Image (tube, helix red, strand yellow):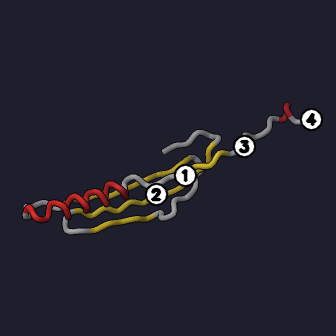
Amino acid sequence: MSLPSNLKAKPPAEARQSTESRFVNCNVVTETSDHGWHVSYHLAESAGRFPPGDYSSHCRALQQAVDLLRPRLIATAEEPALLKSSVR
């Protein structure tokens, strides 16, 4: 994700996050650069059949994975550089 030049990316609280369950495994790495963030991920969902009683656990596991795929990213505004012609 690229930011406009007047914004600076802050590093996330946790650069590496993961969740593992019998339904889904998800790993997310968020790297900060001068121009924004690079988010890479690996997501694997288990194949197979599960009993109906596992449906709510399945939904919770998928929601945890989705939450990891939406890291909370914060940028701060930077003052624009002064042009030489505007300095007196």
Q: Residues within 10 Å of mark 1 (few under 14, many from 20)?
A: few
Indicate the amino acid at tag 1: Ile
C-alpha gap between disc 2 and disc 1: 12 Å
- The extreme right residue here reads 88
Callout 3: helix, strand or loop?
loop
Q: Residue at x 28, y 68 (%)?
A: 20
Residue that appears at 35% across and 62% down: 27
Which residue is under mark 4? 88
Look at mark 1 in the image and give the residue it sits on. Answer: 74
In the displayed structure, 15 sits above or below 9; it is below
Q: SS at mark 1?
A: loop
Q: Earlier in the sequence, mark 2 or mark 1?
A: 2
Residue at 7% in and 64% down: 51
Residue type, label 2 = Thr
Q: CA distance from mark 3 to mark 4?
A: 18 Å
What residue is at 23 percent from the left and 62 percent from the top? 24
Residue 80 drawn at (x, y percent)? 72, 40
Are there few (<14), some (14-19), or many (20+) residues within 10 Å of tag 4? few
| Residue 36 percent coordinates (x, y) | 54, 48
Q: Earlier in the sequence, mark 2 or mark 4?
A: 2
User: Gap between marks 1 and 3, in whole Å?
Assistant: 17 Å
Tag shown at residue 29? none
Give how far apart the Cα atoms at labels 2 and 3 are.
25 Å
Residue identifier under label 3: 79
- Whichever of callouts 3 and 4 sits on the residue coming sooner in the sequence is 3
Q: Is residue 58 left or right of residue 36?
A: left
Which mark identifies residue 30?
2
